[in-house]
Amino acid sequence: MPKEIIQQMRKQMEKILESTAKEFSNIRTG
């Protein structure tokens, strides 16, 4: 696989992890 695709996938995974982490923190505080 080209490095470009791997980098794009990694960025998407980081975005998903950040969004899920925010949701978890919101649930905890809420």
Image (cartoon, rainbow, N blue to C red):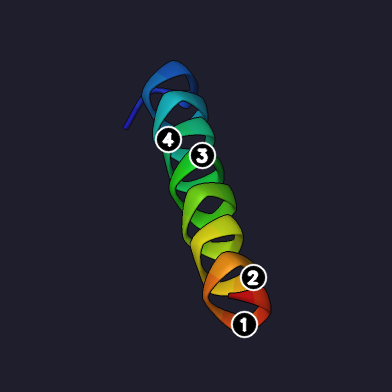
Kind of residue at disc 3? Lys
Q: Earlier in the sequence, mark 4 or mark 1?
A: 4
Please say if the residues under marks 4 and 3 sit with CB atoms less than 8 Å apart.
Answer: yes
Circle number at residue 11? none
Residue 25 is marked as 2
Tag 1–tag 2 contact (CB < 8 Å): yes
Near mark 3 (Cα within 10 A), the count class, few <14, some 14-19 or many ≥20, is few
Amino acid type of disc 2? Ser
How far, Cα to Cα, is label 4 from label 1?
24 Å
According to the image, label 3 marks what residue?
15
Q: Where is residue 14 in the image (x, y as percent from the top left)?
A: 56, 45
Determine whether, in the image, residue 12 is placed left or right of residue 26.
Answer: left
Q: Which residue is drawn at 37% across and 23% down?
A: 5
Q: What residue type is labelled 1?
A: Arg
**Which residue sits at x=42%, y=35%?**
12
* 29 or 18, nearer to the observer: 29
Q: Earlier in the sequence, mark 3 or mark 1?
A: 3
Q: Name the residue under label 4.
A: 12
The residue type indicated by label 4 comes to Gln
Check disc 3 and report its element: helix, strand or loop: helix
Residue 22: quarter of image: bottom right
Query: In this orientation, which residue lies closer to the viewer: 8 or 2?
Result: 8
Discs 2/3, front: 2
